[in-house]
Image (cartoon, helix red, strand yellow):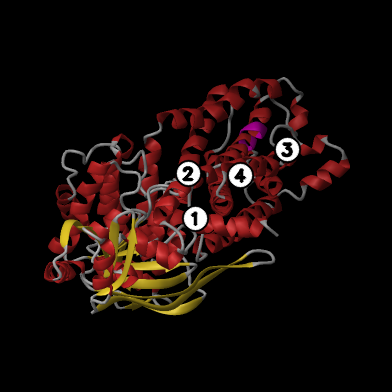
Amino acid sequence: MAIIEASGLARTFKSRKREVHAVRGVDLTVDEGEIVGFLGPNGAGKTTTLRMLTTLLRPTAGTATIAGADLLRDPVAVRRRIGFVPQAIGQTMGGTDNQAKVIEELLDQAALYRIGKAEGAARAGRLISQLDLSGLADRLVKTLSGGQRRRLEIALGLVHEPPLVFLDEPTTGLDPQSRSNLWDHIRKLRSDLGTTVFLTTHYLEEADALCDRVIIIDNGVTVAAGTPDELKRSISGDVVTLRVSGPAADAQELLGVQPIVRDVTFSEGDLRLTVEHGEEALPALLRVLDGAGITISSISLSRPTLDDVFLTLTGRSLRDDSHSAGPAGDPELATAAVAASEE
Amino acid sequence: MAFFSDTALLFRRHFRLLMREPAYIAFALMQPLLFLILFGPLLTKLPAATFGGSTSGDAWRFFVPGLLIQLALFGSTFVGFAIISDWRAGVIERFRVTPVSRIAIMSGRVLRDVVTLVIQGILLVLVGLAFGLRAPLGAVLISLGFIAVVAVGLASVSYAVALLLKSEDAFAPLVNTVVVPLVLLSGIMLPMTLGPGWLQGVARISPFRYIIDAMRSAFAGQYWNTIMLEGVAVAIGLAVICLYLGSRVFLRENA
């Protein structure tokens, strides 16, 4: 069953003379229990979309149903049923107060959701152990490490046990070890609590490792959705690179007529074949070459990465993007500001 | 009602966080005392008639209400700074995604500021007593009531403006530009009646002029007159308008 169903969501920011179409038309469906990654280059409309889905920003067009509540007609019901963990880097941080104690943040958050004192304390205790914050309850937030603080921020988003949680750049700014540790925690949200997770990320390996499905947004429009494998296949197929002992031209001719081979090129001694399903194609290719008496000296199979997908769909590489953007802040706002100042 | 329990919740949170800033508390308490100690004795050397009285106690009865209003003016208009850093910490967004009343995000803080201000005010009056202030208890209570109402209005607007600007660099000069003339025109340091006619006319624009006149009237033992009525009307009117404007900002879809 769908827990997020959005169609035609759009948001236009008006500056004095110009209209900035931060998001033009976002259509997306997220099923219960999925971990979905929302990817897009900076300025594509990721943050604006997330802010609309979490009731922080009212869409100028479109409709959405989130956790069974209508986004436009009943935003308060949406707020009750979702958790939101803001990004911890950029213009605004992750939502914890330096001077507050860990336990106070959790208890206050429970009270904000109007959870009774005893129940709030019980949930705070559970979250502290689930998110590896044991022993830190009475520490001030400012004394936590980056990873600990991030886990607290995630715990705050879970106090009311929402069926759906939005994580904005959950691991940005963390070291690799804290990152993979956080991935485990995010996986456990789904496996232990049945929570649906909708996250934005700059890291392709994160989308690949963590997400069941990926939705790509570019220029304010959703341009693709699917499992990471589906997306990679839809773009370019797999690439088989092989070397033969003997004349390569014969092999090229022979392979070029095979129905499973989309394309063959030859350069610097290597034959490069594009095929649909690499693992299944390999044995068949070996049989064909063997049958023709051609000996293979080396063979390798490589798959397109999510970055290749990204490059094909958006004309930009996500990797370059994450570098140039850095922690400079809200990309959409920056775009809007640039547009406004250009007048 | 949820609004009141939300306000109480956020009041407790902000009060608890404030108590963790001992340096801030020390400075907040010091500031009015410095005025009392370093400026008060100058006034008592002026002829008592300057303050419309006949003894040196009249100078204190003139000066302490003025300091109370000044405390409210400075204390409450600068509170907006804190919400800018909270916004930057992502705390405002975090609250806005919960079902908590959005006005309570403002009113919880405002209540904290009012309580802090009243505590400062009580301390100021107590030290004033030590210096020679003699005033009826009723006057002190009425004055504390006045500064509480003033603080509700000013703090609400301060938070709203700070949240719209989202920049300390823009907020500080703005507040200074607004507050300094208000302080000068309210006759806090010296009676406005000493000034030329045009200045007295301009001073009539400042709402605080009416409030301070009412407070001084109470300190002189006169509770029931048109001055008091004007003061009450202006204080409540100002608070209502400011609360309305502040609430509008906090209810905005994208603050």
Q: Is residue B145 visible?
A: yes
- Secondary structure beneath dot 2 equals helix
Mark toward the start of the polypeptide (4 vs 2): 2
- Taking depth in this image into account, of B42 and B132 the one nearest to the observer is B42
Name the residue rendered at 70%, 48% in the picture.
Answer: B210
**Outermost residue toward the right?**
B197
Mark 4 to mark 1 CA distance (whole Å): 24 Å
A101 to A16, vertically: above or below: above
Q: Which mark is residue B184?
A: 3
| Left or right of A304 in this view: B22 | right
> What residue is pinned by disc 4?
B171
* Amino acid, disc 2: Ser
Task: Give the quarter of the figure containing the N terminus of chain B.
Answer: bottom left
At mark 4, the secondary structure is: helix
Q: CA distance from mark 4 to mark 2?
A: 12 Å
Mark 2 = which residue? B85
User: Do the residues at discs 1 and 2 belong to one chain?
Assistant: no
Instruction: Give the foreground label among 3 and 1.
Output: 1
The residue labelled by disc 1 is A331
